[in-house]
Image (cartoon, grey):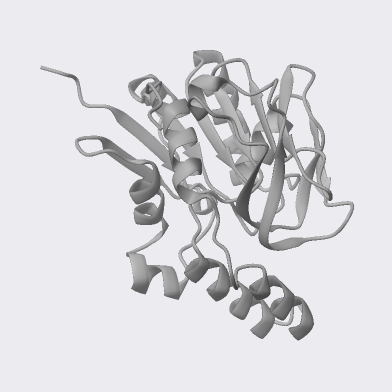
Amino acid sequence: MVEQKRYALFLATLDSEFVKKAYGGYHNVFVSTFGDEGEQWDSFRVVSGEFPDEKDLEKYDGFVISGSSHDSFENHDWILKLCDIVKKIDELKKKTLGICFGHQIIARVRGGTVGRARKGPDLRLGDITIVKDAVKPSYFGDEIPSSMAIIKCHQDEVLVVPETATVLAYSENYEVEMFSIEDHFFCVQGHPEYNKEILFEIIDRVLAQGFIKQDFADTAKATMENREADRKLWEKICMNFLKGKIPTN
């Protein structure tokens, strides 16, 4: 009998009312994107101080660290605890997918520098350029694209990558859109798990809260007027990394 695969999702954000109503929470958004039938996915709301016991980390086949409205360079107790957990996962060489805030936390833990984005926040569908000679074909399949579209939602960035990191993608505004460390850390600044509906709700919410202006919101929405993110390809890449799958095109 094949042993059931177990994954842990570290949620560094609270569920919005929209996500709760539409999807039942971010847990379901992530599992529907990266999960396979028969797997066990456990969520830990790290932003609320919920963490697994360190002795239980070995039980998991992989981890996913979500985005957050918090800054990855802050020193809140839960962020420092998350950094400690990531250090332990690093020692165990467990496969870990870092998304947005998670991408930045992994960079921080491994000695990189994170901070406020030098060219300002990003909230839109954007294209990133793939460093084709650096990526693993085992993640992408037979054909590695020169660029990929992904939904962006961040105001911070990785300013300096850790010495041991390999930059896998960049864009016109950000030098580090994707990086890997050894075979167990894979980090993406954008949001492979987001769709147009989620992006538009976030835009409307931050507009209502006064964080952005109407013209910024209109421009952000216009990026998805006639095109979509490469979600199926992102899903395949992330799952190939997490689960060591053989790619199929």
Q: Is residue 226 above or below residue 229?
A: below
Residue 141 image position (x, y, % from top left): 48, 26
Check the image and name the residue furthest to the left: 1
Between residue 131 and residue 23, name the one nearer to us: 131
The residue that appears at 45% across and 32% down in the rendered structure is 63
One can see residue 220 in this view = yes
Q: Left or right: where does residue 101 sit relative to residue 3?
A: right
The residue that appears at 72% across and 22% down in the rendered structure is 166
Residue 217 image position (x, y, % from top left): 70, 78
Q: Left or right: where does residue 93 sit relative to residue 52?
A: right
Residue 64 image position (x, y, % from top left): 48, 38
Figure quadrant of the N terminus:
top left
The residue that appears at 41% across and 35% down in the rendered structure is 52
One can see residue 213 in this view = no
Between residue 136 and residue 41, name the one nearer to us: 136
Check the image and name the residue furthest to the right: 118
Give the quadrant of residue 168: top right
